[in-house]
Amino acid sequence: MEINQRISTLIDKLGYNKSTFAQKTGISQPIITHITNGRNNPGLEVIQKILTNCQEVNPDWLILGIGEMTLNNKLNRKLINDLISDINNDYLKLIDEANILKDKINLLQEMLQKA
């Protein structure tokens, strides 16, 4: 995999689009687009900005394609935390729905007692 492809992969794995990645790294969006499209190779300044602003990225992977994409599983931790948050939100929604159903059951039981 060429460095251009690794940068595209990195952007995807971080969950960014090119615009957000450009803002995060301080690299102009047209430069990111030219790199990810394979039109240009990244220069030293671009690589430095990526490594400075995305400290979870393994420099060996980015520059040479050696090893894992991230260091210390920071990306994995972010993904796991996002999943935990999503599951927690789903759980809270289910609790709310269960309480609504419980209230409806109580109302129906009251109506039966009055009839």
Image (cartoon, rainbow, N blue to C red):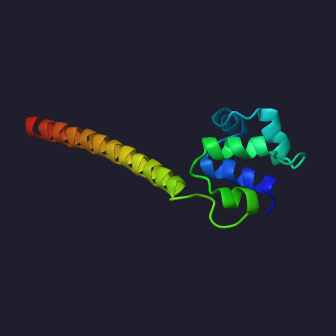
Q: Quadrant of residue 114?
A: top left
Q: Farthest residue in the bottom direction?
A: 67
Q: Quadrant of the N terminus?
A: bottom right
Q: Farthest residue in the left direction?
A: 113
Nearer-the-camera pick, 61 or 45: 45
Residue at the image point whose x is 88% and y is 46% from the top: 40
Q: On screen, 1 above or below 92? A: below
Is 89 on the left-hand or right-hand side of 9? Answer: left
Residue at the image point whose x is 76% and y is 32% from the top: 28
Q: Quadrant of the C terminus?
A: top left
Is 33 on the left-hand or right-hand side of 51? Answer: right
Nearer-the-camera pick, 89 or 33: 33
Percent from the top left, x then y, of residue 62?
A: 71, 56
Percent from the top left, x then y, of residue 68?
A: 62, 64
Q: On screen, 2 above or below 53? A: below
Q: Quadrant of residue 63?
A: bottom right
Percent from the top left, x then y, of residue 55?
A: 58, 48
Residue at the image point whose x is 71% and y is 54% from the top: 9
Count of marks, rendered view: 0
Percent from the top left, x then y, of residue 100?
A: 27, 39
Q: On screen, 92 above or below 76? A: above
Residue at the image point whose x is 31% and y is 42% from the top: 97
